[in-house]
Amino acid sequence: MSRVRTSTMDGDLQKVFGNPVPELYEAAVGHDASPALTRALELRSFLALTEEQVARVRDRVHADMDPDRDMGELSADKLRFEAQWLEAALDARDSYRAALGELLRTMPPPDQRARPVRTAQLRATATLPPSAAPAPQRAGAARARRP
């Protein structure tokens, strides 16, 4: 997982989990790491990588469009390719941001561990009126079927 690159959602991760991202990665390698933390850091790594790709394409386009650059080097085909690359990288970035944001919004608070739920055992109590007649000898036996 990416630990060096930053992402635009690092602040959100720190706010939700209560520690800076490097410390979150250290906590995630422990055997008691929550699945939500592990998943969040995985999405964060993908996001950071994708944001780096967006920045690289942006920087290449800026370099190609530099006013001091020779106009003869400018290529419409190259710029179209960069636009396609940028569109794909931005789509991926938006998807990772949405997935990570959804995970952070829907996960239980980090201090709330999964605990078994205890429910009260309800008991039905009823008293039946005393019967005037004694129970038949075959009480509880299956009745014969009628044709």
Image (tube, helix red, strand yellow):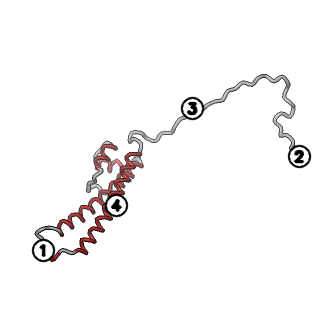
**Disc 3 residue crowd, few under 14, some 14–19, many 20+, Cα 10 Å:** few
Disc 1 vs disc 2: Cβ atoms closer than 8 Å?
A: no
Q: Earlier in the sequence, mark 3 or mark 4?
A: 4
Q: Earlier in the sequence, mark 4 or mark 1?
A: 1
Label 4 SS: helix
Which residue bears the numbered disc 4? 92
Q: Amino acid at mark 1?
A: Asp
49 with respect to 112 (left or right): left
Q: CA distance from mark 2 to mark 4?
A: 72 Å
Q: Position of residue 35 (x, y in %)?
A: 42, 49
90 with respect to 123 (left or right): left
Q: Earlier in the sequence, mark 1 or mark 2?
A: 1
Q: Amino acid at mark 4?
A: Ala
Label 3 SS: loop
Which residue bears the numbered disc 2? 147
Which residue bears the numbered disc 3? 120
- Residue 70's mark? 1
State which mark lies toward you, 3 or 2: 2
Q: CA distance from mark 4 to mark 1?
A: 33 Å
